[in-house]
Amino acid sequence: MRLNRIGVEWLQIFSNRYRLFPFTKSYCTHLQPVGKEKVYITTPIFYVNAAPHIGHLYTALLADAVARFHTLHGKEVIFSTGTDEHGLKIQTSAAKHNKSPELYCDEISAKFKTLFDRSGVSYSYFIRTTDETHTKAVENLWTTLVKKGYIYKGKYEGWYSISDEEFLSEDEVCDQKKESGEIQKVSVSSGQPVVWMSEENYMFRLTSFKAQLIKWLNTGVVYPEEKRSQVDLALRNLQDLSVSRSSSRLSWGIPVPGDSSQTIYVWLDALMNYLTVAGYPGHLQNWPPDIQIVGQDILKFHAIYWPAFLLGADLDLPKQIVCHAHWTVDGYKMSKSRGNVVDPEERMNRLTETGFRYFLLRSGTVFTNCNYNDDVAKDIINAEIVNTYLNLLSRTSSKSINKQAIFPAFDGEAFQSFFTEEERDMFNSLSDLIEICNNHYKGFLCHKVSEAIFEYLRWSNKLFNDHEPWQLCKDPINESHVRCLLHLNMETLRVCSILLQPLIPDIANQVLDRLGIREGHRLIKHCEERRQSHRDRDHLLIVQKNYIMQRIK
């Protein structure tokens, strides 16, 4: 599976002020108002036992798209992500690489941060569980839960998945035959081997919160609703949770306060990161989280363990847990043994940062597993970003047709005279696209946003073809016809570019630059407001000498 070296340069606009790659942090941050509604959005923190893959990146990109969408509605967004750096799995991985856990975590965490920065993930906080502030927050929560009587010394006996860092009931494991014919116990959900554990440690009274958890879950907090079934299965088998490990087995973690013979369970440690970002144990800001985006493999931890810890500490619960599906490669689960793990850095080298970002957001869903294929990615980027979106900009700003390099004012008389009723209806329905995209973004349906926007962009390209402006502009008598056509095309580009900012922020903003749209007029509300002002007068395009648009070879 090999992709030809890409010769794509998109529409590259070079000036002293703007760069296309790498991504800038966010074009929207300067638009965040003071004293307006705040939205707290989180990704899970990512386990640093190995380098990041496309599943990690998709989670971060989905959260970033949602964060940018809320910013475009004039809200102040607090967006946190980071890395989970404690646990037996990391301790083991570091030893295999002949590195200290500290050095190993530093290296892998840096890879996540570099990937997210390169991909345009506009986080407010990048937290690491090895941060001193986080350690203090975890210790404080532990002490609080002990004082309230929710943590007690006991004996845990049961199955444990080292790979998943997860305790499992009998109903959550099954027998699996290995290639050698030997039978082994594995986790039903992940397929990872499990081991039987029996040790003295600290237990959390998880069962005490069952009724409250069910009541909270019944408010519809888990989205999509179909994912609720796996939470219900875990609730039926609910047991008190082991929240520590013997430090003789697990030394890489936060010691239990007052008992250095025990290390705090990695999931209690990791889940606390959202509180640490909010200022715990001091005054909590922006609490509780509005949107917490997770992969389906860790839904149980966020829909059961996490709210139970918060209930034990008398803290408000998250408003929404959004669970997305997995990514496969050519229909198969990613695995090192199959050799199909997709390296996002390498793919960005081939497809560009914008191209790869767009493909993941355009092809991923929260409902069903998503599939990655190199050829499909290349074809989609060519067909949609290059041949449809950027091609429309190139055509409307062509010097042979748009000789004055302007975004013409709307001409109602020409609109009625030269365009069919069907064409007029389609253009007038551009206002509907705003609400359609709003609803899709609210539903975390980036693929639907893309589908709706590109329906208009394809129509706009067809409109351009049908009216043949290269012929019309040969006769000055057709000037009003050409000007009106350019207005319809450019207005479609303007509205679509504003709505595309959460998906492809750098390219969308560069198109808006080219159209002469000021940075302060790129919020969702300006889609309609500016439509009215653009009807009244011409304005000049931002003319750049160098821009190149090429297909992926």
Image (spheres, helix red, strand yellow):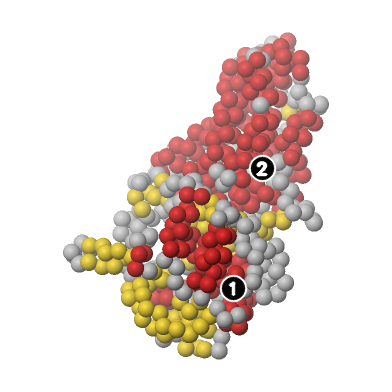
Direction from residue 134 to residue 17 in the image, left or right: right
Residue type highlighted by circle 2: Asn
Q: CA distance from mark 2 to mark 1?
A: 46 Å
Residue extending farthest to the left is: 181
Residue 344, relative to residue 538: is it above or below?
A: below
Quarter placement of the C terminus: top left
Quarter residue 127 falls in: bottom right
User: Residue sitting at 66 percent across and 36 percent down?
Assistant: 435
Q: Position of residue 138 (x, y in %)?
A: 58, 77
Report if the CB atoms under discs 2 and 1 are less than 8 Å apart: no
Q: Residues within 10 Å of mark 1 (few under 14, many from 20)?
A: many
Quarter residue 157 falls in: bottom left
Residue 232, relative to residue 245: is it above or below?
A: above
Direction from residue 408 to residue 132 in the image, left or right: left
On the image, numbered disc 2 is attached to which residue? 509
On the image, numbered disc 1 is attached to which residue? 312
Secondary structure category for the residue under label 1: helix
Q: Decide if residue 388 is in sight here.
A: yes
Q: Position of residue 155 (x, y in %)?
A: 41, 83
The one of 290 and 538 positioned closer to us in this rendering? 290
User: Residue sitting at 78 percent across and 26 percent down?
Assistant: 535
Q: Position of residue 327 (x, y in %)?
A: 43, 51
Residue type highlighted by circle 1: Gly
User: Residue sitting at 65 percent across and 65 percent down?
Assistant: 316
Q: Earlier in the sequence, mark 2 or mark 1?
A: 1
Q: Position of residue 329 (x, y in %)?
A: 38, 49
Mark 2 or mark 1: which is in front? Answer: 1
Residue 351, relative to residue 209: is it above or below?
A: above
Q: Residues within 10 Å of mark 2 (few under 14, many from 20)?
A: many
User: Residue sitting at 36 percent across and 64 percent down?
Assistant: 172
The one of 244 and 355 positioned closer to us in this rendering? 244
